[in-house]
Image (cartoon, grey):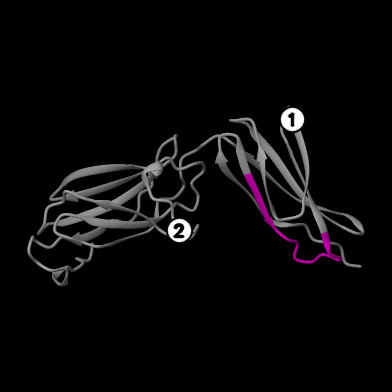
Amino acid sequence: MAPDTPPQFLRARKLSDYEVELSWEPPREANSDILYYVVRVWNETTELWQNVTGTSVVINVDSESRYNASVSSWTRLGNGGVLIYISFTTTDAEPFDPPQNVTYANVTASSVTLLWHPPTEPNGIIVHYTIYYSDNGTVAQQRVPVSDLPAPASPDSALSYTLTRLIGGTNYIVWMTSSTVQGDGGVQSEPLTLFLPEDGQSDTHMHTVPHT
């Protein structure tokens, strides 16, 4: 009988200072049905074992520590014997990448709604986004705490925020960063250039100026 393969793609996602979600995919080839997974999480001072029937589990951890985690699959034949292993830390770092897919909608003479998705590698919990907007070289910024954003309809829905008190008839360049408590990682989204119509014009006069 061919040997079992381990569970795949084990990853850790921080939910709060004291909670981390571990998730994984089933093995590519299991010789018989998987009854449950054995999750082991340990560091220098603690060790936790848990049997899990699904493919994710939320574990409680002490803040700011480095942990190891392993997952193996159990079938009626016993322990699959092969496990997948990662290390993770509960300390926040800075995001590796900026807000994703930043676009805009509902342009008026004085406002624009921005739409975006969170960074794919936040390295912690995003606490706020910053929108930067520039006309003729002056840069303004609007910090948007995550707690002020409406909850997305689904995990894949875009986040949105409406910038107001803008000046009609003006070209703006807009870009965004996302920050954990440690900072924004120095990464920003690609600049968008947009033109706000003057008062009294309809949206049909709106157009995008290519950013060079």
Looking at the image, the residue that sits furthest to the bottom is 204
**In the shown orientation, is residue 139 left or right of residue 2?**
left
Q: Amino acid at mark 1?
A: Thr
Q: Is residue 212 visible?
A: no
**In the shown orientation, is residue 174 left or right of residue 7?**
left
Q: Residues within 10 Å of mark 2 (few under 14, many from 20)?
A: few
Label at residue 87? none
Q: Amino acid at mark 2?
A: Ala
Nearer-the-camera pick, 27 or 162: 162
Estimate the x, y position of residue 14 in percent, counting from the top left: 57, 42
Secondary structure at badge 1 equals loop
Q: Determine which residue is flagged by label 1.
A: 46
Secondary structure at badge 2 equals loop
Q: Residues within 10 Å of mark 1 (few under 14, many from 20)?
A: few
Q: Determine which residue is flagged by label 2.
A: 153
Q: How many marks?
A: 2
Question: On the image, which quarter does residue 186 sit in?
Answer: top left
Residue located at (48% from left, 60% from top): 156
Estimate the x, y position of residue 188 in percent, counting from the top left: 35, 49
Residue 90 highlighted magenta (yes or no): no
Estimate the x, y position of residue 125 in percent, counting from the top left: 49, 41
In the image, the segment drawn in magenta is: 21-34
